[in-house]
Amino acid sequence: MWVGCDNEQTIAAEAVPQHQAAALWVKEGEVHVRVKLFAWLNVPEYHVVVGRLSL
């Protein structure tokens, strides 16, 4: 598992009226999540590699 900020901003503050925002995707068998707390502010997004898919 990996957690950190990668200086990418993919969740637009104007498009997210909620307090939190998240995005989920799978890349090369790994499950990734991007989380933004206090989404209306100019704060960093956290990129988390949650785990690997098992078939």
Image (cartoon, rainbow, N blue to C red):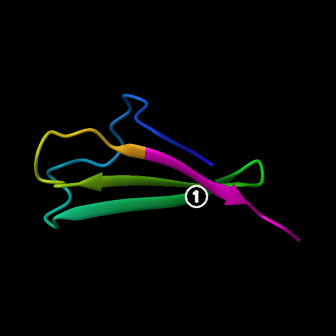
Q: Is residue 26 left or right of residue 28?
A: left
- Front residue (pair 27, 20): 20
Please report the residue visible at 51 percent of the width from the left and 61 percent of the height from the top.
Answer: 24
Quadrant housing residue 25 = bottom right
Image quadrant assignment for residue 43: top left
Q: Residue furthest right?
A: 55
Q: Residue 40 location in percent, x, y? A: 11, 53
Q: Residues within 10 Å of mark 1 (few under 14, many from 20)?
A: few
Residue at the image point whose x is 14% and y is 51% from the top? 14
Q: Position of residue 1 (x, y in %)?
A: 63, 49
Residue 11: give x, y in percent of width and height: 31, 49
- The range drawn in magenta is 47-55
Identify the residue position indicated by label 1 in the image.
25
Is 4 drawn above or below residue 7 in the view shown? below
Q: Is residue 38 left or right of residue 24?
A: left
Q: Is residue 40 magenta?
A: no
User: Which quarter of the rendered picture does the C terminus lie within?
Assistant: bottom right
On the image, the x and y values in percent for residue 45 come to 33, 43
Element on which disc 1 rests: strand
From the image, give the main secondary structure of the stretch colored magenta: strand
Give the camera-side residue of 17 and 43: 43
Amino acid type, residue under disc 1 in the picture: Trp
Residue at the outermost bottom position? 55
- Please report the residue visible at 33 percent of the width from the left and 37 percent of the height from the top: 9
